[in-house]
Amino acid sequence: MLSEAGHGGQPGKERARVEAKTVHRVQSVRHLTDSAFILRVDRHGLPAVAGQCATVGAAGSGVNREYSLYSGDHDPFFEFLVKEVEEGQVSPALKKCVPGDPVELDGPYGRFVVQAPDDRSRRYLFVATGVGIAPFHGFAGSYPGLDYLLLHGVRRLAERYEKEFYPPGRYIACVSGEPGGDFSGRATDYLRSHPVDPQTYCYLCGNSAMVAEAYEILRAQGLGGDRLFTEVFF
């Protein structure tokens, strides 16, 4: 999807899909800012891997949007990090949900996943903008032994969604709209000034402009295409 601050997918990406059209109940809505919130719903034991996504919408609305899982592999619920779009068809309705409300969920599915989470020799770089941090939250929660650095590009300090979740030294907030972040500027500015080891496995998730720019920067720094994984939100 290219709207509602949801997940955009990769053009031409093959998806291994698990159909699951059961109506799920909302467990909670956790508000992080005036527009961003975490929707938690029943999982019903469905299989899922951190980094996958699902389409979600209010029950009976006939309109769903695609969101990456914010929750981890073994959580007994599904969580989604959602940014409200005021004129959107899905996110405002999800924001108004209360515990017990039904939502429709199709999935999870997708291949934006950690390839070898048990391989302790691998070093990972995760680069996100805004709510594009969602799959990386799932990675961090599912694989606590993972050796990673997470760059999170945001405009405001308030958009450093649950930064305290990440261990010290793992999360760097690249704040472009006001002072006070770990790095002043965009995530791509950080990449230019901090070259990446070509042996690193890099995952890029967020708006299409960042993903395209970061991809070119990393290729110029010597990373091969087999070490670059992308997911476009909008």
Image (cartoon, rainbow, N blue to C red):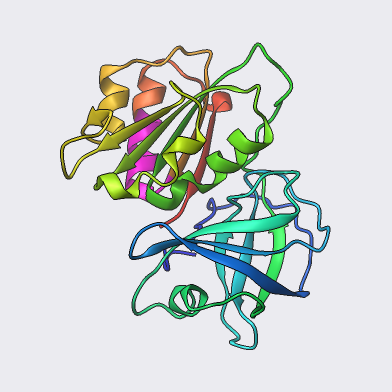
Observer-nearest of 27 and 187: 27
The quarter of the image holding the C terminus is bottom left
Coordinates of residue 21 in the picture (x, y in percent): 76, 73
- Relative height, residue 230 to residue 80 (above, below): above
- Relative height, residue 151 to residue 63 (above, below): above
At 64% from the left edge and 83% from the top edge, which residue is drawn?
59
User: Which corner quadrant of the image does residue 39 belong to?
Assistant: bottom right
At 50% from the left edge and 26% from the top edge, which residue is drawn?
167
Give the main secondary structure, helix, strand or loop, of the magenta stretch.
helix
User: Which corner quadrant of the image does residue 152 belong to?
Assistant: top left
- Relative height, residue 119 to residue 127 (above, below): above
Horizontal side, residue 227 vs residue 176: left or right: right
Observer-nearest of 26 and 228: 26
- Relative height, residue 168 to residue 179 (above, below): above
Coordinates of residue 38 in the picture (x, y in percent): 51, 59
At 81% from the left edge and 63% from the top edge, which residue is drawn?
44
Horizontal side, residue 22 vs residue 90: left or right: right
Coordinates of residue 119 in the picture (x, y in percent): 71, 17
